[in-house]
Amino acid sequence: MSDERNYVKYTFLRVDPAWRRRKAAERAADKREFAAACRDFGEDHFLRTYSLVGTRGDCDLMVRAIAGRLEPIHELHVLLNQSGLMRYAEVAHSYLAMTKESPYSDEPDRPAEPRPGADSRYLIVYPMWKKREWYGLPPEERGRIMRDHIAVARRFPGIETNTAYSFGLDDQEFVVAFDADDPSHFLDLVQELRATESSAYTESETPIFTCISASPERALDALDGEAVGATALS
């Protein structure tokens, strides 16, 4: 079992409609500054961007950053805040977590790196809390319940699960992210999981974000339609 861990930060941004009324050249400069900060962080750390235009009404863009220390994530967001875009944007949702080995899975985990599906077309993310009764169960009972939960999930091989832990770091207990190329498969998975015993111990798992994977440039272009036109986001 590896003791190596990483911090994971999910930052969801909502852009003020006033930004789209700025001149095209000003918007282009704002996007270049934001993308440059993302590219700089991505040279030494894991960073992915996602568009939520058309999938959520309260946010437009998500930045997913992973690093072994908090300082690089802090510095990334300092640079993002210096971009012109952030003068017209707000953080709609923010989740901090840490990777570590799962105590339930019987397969080797890789907590220090993203799953193989990390570049799937979609990433579905939500914060999660368990009911306090869950933590009062004997470890072997929790293990039995979670093995049944995992068995259901394994019937959907196109879905890669990335669970990160937030105890003491942020308000939620977990942040769960699912890499998928077809959201309908995730819908079917969640519907089946509702019937499992583990579901009865879930306190909350909202809000849920369906994110479309995109390069920083394409995710930014989706904010005002410039340069994307009728072209798909991937």
Image (cartoon, rainbow, N blue to C red):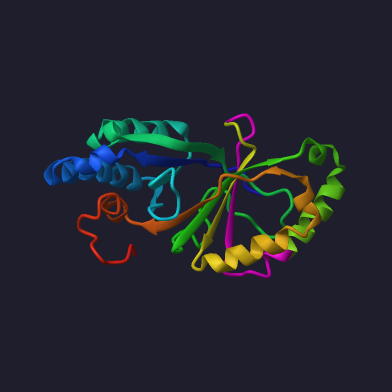
Vertical order, 15 against 185 (above or below): above
Instruction: Measuring from the top left, give residue 12's x and y in whole percent.
Output: 43, 42
Q: Which residues are magenta?
A: 152-169
Instruction: Measuring from the top left, give residue 66's x and y in whole percent.
Output: 46, 44
Classify residue 18 as left or right of residue 128.
left
Q: Is 153 colored magenta in this rendering? A: yes
Q: Residue at x 36, y 45 (%)?
A: 44
Q: Residue at x 62, y 44 (%)?
A: 100
Instruction: Measuring from the top left, give residue 160's x and y in whole percent.
Output: 57, 61
Q: Residue at x 68, y 62 (%)?
A: 191
Vertical order, 116 against 64 (above or below): below
Q: Nearer the viewer, residue 51 or 42?
A: 51
- Residue 154 visible: yes
Instruction: Measuring from the top left, give residue 14's x and y in whole percent.
Output: 38, 40
Vertical order, 116 against 221 (above or below): below
Q: Is 155 colored magenta in this rendering? A: yes
Quadrant containing the C terminus in the rendered view:
bottom left
